């Protein structure tokens, strides 16, 4: 066994909410020392999504969403808008490998903490900014959160029931997508730094990043100038292809038939082998044209079965089929459980629970949850004492001056 | 003159057959890595996917391939023949990363297990992308994009509450797995380069998607509260997609944006309104606020409302069609879309890179024709003669 792949890489993490913290979660899972920096008046909104009564003691340390996303990280408070706070941040940057931020485009420059400034104290530093629209252009200062990104990237337009309106996806989709890309970009910059000895600046515009996940649609539009239509769960060539009801309340299975052989297998699994020779369904084109009828036949069969039984039957015949797993079902899923996807964590304030662990499985350096998410300001002493060499008195003075603090200003996210 | 950073000494060998693997290696190629896609002599399976230029199916003009194959080199190779395997071993010696997406176990059967590969190349990174990972019950289950999307929980969150769950547009399960594989492979390659550590990276599409369930999974795991039932297009009065006058507007208003939002919709009096004074009261009086928002949205020209909201710093976007993307002043001002001449399909437009690096330039190159680089790879770089190529071709190895 080897040390974790990013052991020894220090990341200063100014990001909040989901996109940036998902990126640093990936880095932290891989062994990077991620130091999450918040401040009394600018703290992570995920700490406010607690699902618990607001008068719960230290409720900002008990947010399950925050504690899942920020495991394996250290945390401190530091107000960058105050001169002393900014000065200490530059000292940290001098001994770090990566700085990552997802403020609006102009915020870091307004703090006089742009890449040129940081590079001046450490030319090996890699800096990542991940604004919604990028650092340039007429919309650069537009505020863009979560679900806005998929609306700006064309994905919302592509998603939806046949004949219906564009549909949002189930999550703030652009966020994790931006986070994954940012982590990959940092790894490429680390590779390049071994060649040049220098860091670099990475600009990730979240909407551009998400457009790269529908790239074929862009190319198709340039070929044919046709606006793609929403087609629900159907596919441009496969049939049957969709989501079918199963026995029980709100239970569903997805099925996709890629070719004649799989359709024949599906017909046997349905115990209707004659269907494969039925003139309406005997070839790819006929099945596509008659998929309304075909869907009714498939749905009549699935409706009488549990989604697990139906999936087992179809898979053993060689047909792609999978129950639509609800979130609690994901948490209980035997595949995930077998692979140790969920790991126990013990948090000093929030207590013990189980969450999803590192999902990049590295054979020679398996990763696990090593640290619970930081409580607010938990590692101030480590960061300012051990890393920056400040005395206890000096650290106390930071608290007294409001540059650091033990509790966030609750009013910010009310 | 400073030495330019480059990924040109990073060699990626792509044995994969699906979108995830092709997207993973596309990103390496886009930033300058040498990506060799080894296609079966009949062509990469993605070459079969439309839509095609002029709607005429052709192995060189499918939109998926035109997008996912960019900047790669193409060599044909039948790796299921002994001759093909021997050639592959020579290519592996030059590779840093190998990407594959076969059913678990298949690559072992070909004699290309991780252990076999690391004997050829000591610090190889093997990236395996599968629907459920290399291990576990039902790891061999067959999957396509929609069934894979269903396995990771995201589909159950998508769609209207009284209808069937909805798959996201395009091939999102595949792209997510591919993007995760790219980032994981880049981390492993950096590590292999720095510390000579080989790595078998096992990417499960299901796990990738299950890691991105927003607050729904953590809330269930910690609070045993399930709020994941899909809720259609409108989560609340301030988060959702609302019909506008010819088009749609998307709102994602966080508590701190409330005053700016109220001003942006021309109703500053709402800020002082007792019913909506804080997040809690807005939730309690959601129906009333929702009615106000629906009414406001229905009167808006989405493009004008977007510009006005942007200037007022309220997080409101209009739902962009694909044409809207092409016409976006923002994207145009950043030269995001790039035109390229392709020898068979003619001029096409490609989206730019997902991120921009100050020291590593992204490339604008076309996709390779089938086997375009056979001679370069097998003759110039590996020392075979053209007559050897003819022999390999006759035996259906290349």
Image: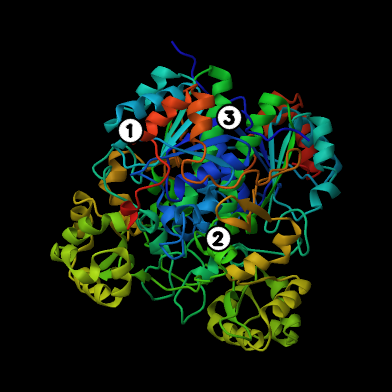
| Label 3 vs label 1, nearer the camera | 1
Tag shown at residue A9: 3
The answer for how far apart the CA atoms under marks 3 and 1 are is: 31 Å
Residue located beneath label 1 in the image: A401
Residue under disc 2 on the same chain as residue under disc 1: no
Residue located beneath label 2 in the image: B218
Marked residue nearer the N-terminal end (3 or 1):
3
Query: Contact, CB < 8 Å: mark 3 with mark 2?
Result: no
Point 31% across, 62% down: residue: B250
The answer for how far apart the CA atoms under marks 3 and 2 are is: 28 Å
Horizontal side, residue B263 vs residue B147: left or right? left
Compared with residue B370, is residue A410 higher up or lower down, i.e. above or below? below
Tag 1, which chain?
A
Residue A207 showing in the rendered view? yes
Residue B345 showing in the rendered view? no
The spot of residue B278 in percent (x, y) is: 27, 63
What secondary structure is found at the residue carrying circle 3? loop
Location of the C terminus of chain B by quadrant is top right
Tag 2, which chain?
B
Point 70% across, 83% down: residue: A277
The image quarter containing residue B257 is bottom left
- Farthest residue in the front direction? A393
């Amino acid at each position: 066994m080897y040390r974790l792949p990013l052991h020894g890489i220090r990341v200063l993490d100014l990001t909040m909410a989901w996109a940036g913290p998902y990126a640093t979660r990936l880095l932290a899972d891989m062994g990077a020392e991620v130091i999450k920096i918040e401040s009394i008046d600018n703290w992570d909104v995920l700490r406010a999504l607690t699902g618990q009564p607001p008068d719960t003691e230290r409720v900002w340390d008990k947010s399950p969403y925050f504690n899942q996303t920020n495991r394996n990280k250290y945390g401190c408070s530091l107000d960058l808008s105050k001169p002393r706070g900014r000065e200490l941040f530059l000292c940290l940057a001098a001994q770090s490998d990566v700085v990552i931020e997802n403020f609006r485009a102009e915020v870091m420059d307004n703090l006089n903490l742009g890449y040129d400034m940081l590079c001046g104290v450490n030319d090996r530093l890699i800096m990542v900014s991940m604004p919604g629209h990028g650092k340039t252009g007429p919309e650069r200062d537009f505020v863009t959160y979560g679900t806005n990104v998929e609306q700006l990237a064309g994905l919302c337009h592509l998603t939806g029931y046949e004949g219906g309106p564009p549909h949002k996806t189930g999550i703030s989709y652009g966020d994790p997508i931006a986070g994954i890309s940012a982590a990959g970009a940092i790894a490429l910059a680390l590779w390049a730094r071994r060649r040049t000895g220098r860091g670099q600046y990475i600009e990730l515009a979240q909407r551009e990043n998400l457009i790269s996940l529908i790239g074929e649609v862009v190319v198709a539009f340039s070929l044919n100038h046709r606006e793609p239509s929403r087609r629900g769960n159907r596919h441009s060539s496969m049939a049957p292809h969709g989501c079918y009801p199963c026995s029980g309340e709100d239970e569903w299975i997805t099925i996709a038939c890629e070719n004649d052989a799989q359709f024949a297998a599906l017909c046997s699994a349905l115990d209707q082998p004659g269907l494969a020779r039925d003139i309406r369904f005997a070839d790819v084109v006929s099945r596509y044209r008659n998929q309304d009828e075909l869907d009714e036949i498939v749905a009549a069969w699935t409706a009488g079965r549990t989604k697990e039984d139906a999936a087992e039957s179809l898979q053993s015949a060689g047909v792609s089929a999978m129950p639509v797993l609800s979130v609690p079902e994901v948490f209980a899923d035997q595949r995930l459980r077998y692979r140790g996807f969920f790991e126990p964590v013990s948090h000093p304030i929030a207590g013990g629970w189980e969450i999803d662990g590192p999902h990049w499985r590295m054979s020679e350096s398996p990763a696990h949850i090593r640290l619970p998410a930081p409580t607010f300001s938990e590692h101030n002493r480590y960061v300012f004492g051990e890393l920056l060499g400040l005395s206890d008195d000096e650290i106390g003075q930071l608290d007294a001056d409001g540059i650091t603090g033990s509790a966030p200003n609750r009013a910010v996210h009310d | 003159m400073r030495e330019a950073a480059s990924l040109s000494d990073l060699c990626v060998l792509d044995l994969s057959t699906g979108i995830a693997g092709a997207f993973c290696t596309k990103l390496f190629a886009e930033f300058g890595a040498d990506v060799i896609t080894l296609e079966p002599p009949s062509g990469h399976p993605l070459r079969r996917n439309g839509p095609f230029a002029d709607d005429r199916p052709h192995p060189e003009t499918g939109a998926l391939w035109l997008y996912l194959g960019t900047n790669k080199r193409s060599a044909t190779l039948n790796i299921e023949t002994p001759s093909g395997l021997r050639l592959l071993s020579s290519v592996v010696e030059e590779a840093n990363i190998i990407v594959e997406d076969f059913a678990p176990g298949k690559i072992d059967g070909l004699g290309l297990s991780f252990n076999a590969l690391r004997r050829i190349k000591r610090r190889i990174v093997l990236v395996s992308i599968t629907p459920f990972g290399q291990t576990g019950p039902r790891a061999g289950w067959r999957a396509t994009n929609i069934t894979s999307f269903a396995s990771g929980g995201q589909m159950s969150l998508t769609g209207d509450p009284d209808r069937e769950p909805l798959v996201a547009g395009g091939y999102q399960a595949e792209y997510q797995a591919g993007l995760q594989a790219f980032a994981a492979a880049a981390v492993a390659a950096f590590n292999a380069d720095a510390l000579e550590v080989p790595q078998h990276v096992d990417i499960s599409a299901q796990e990738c998607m299950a890691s991105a369930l927003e607050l729904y999974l953590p809330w269930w795991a910690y609070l045993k509260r399930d709020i994941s039932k899909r809720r259609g297009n409108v989560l609340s009065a301030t988060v959702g997609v609302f019909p506008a006058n010819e088009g749609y507007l998307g709102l994602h208003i966080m508590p701190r944006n409330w005053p700016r939002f109220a001003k942006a919709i021309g109703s500053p009096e709402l800020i002082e309104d007792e019913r909506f004074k804080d997040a809690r009261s807005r939730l309690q009086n959601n129906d009333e606020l929702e009615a106000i928002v629906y009414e406001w949205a229905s009167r808006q020209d989405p493009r004008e409302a977007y510009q006005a909201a942007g200037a007022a710093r309220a997080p409101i976007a209009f739902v962009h069609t694909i044409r809207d993307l092409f016409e976006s002043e923002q994207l145009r001002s950043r030269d995001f879309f790039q035109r390229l001449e392709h020898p068979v399909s003619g001029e096409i437009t490609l989206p730019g890179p997902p991120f921009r690096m100050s020291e590593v330039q992204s490339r604008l190159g076309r996709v390779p024709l089938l086997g375009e680089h056979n001679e370069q790879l097998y003759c110039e770089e590996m020392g075979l003669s053209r007559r050897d190529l003819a022999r390999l071709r006759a035996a259906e190895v290349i």
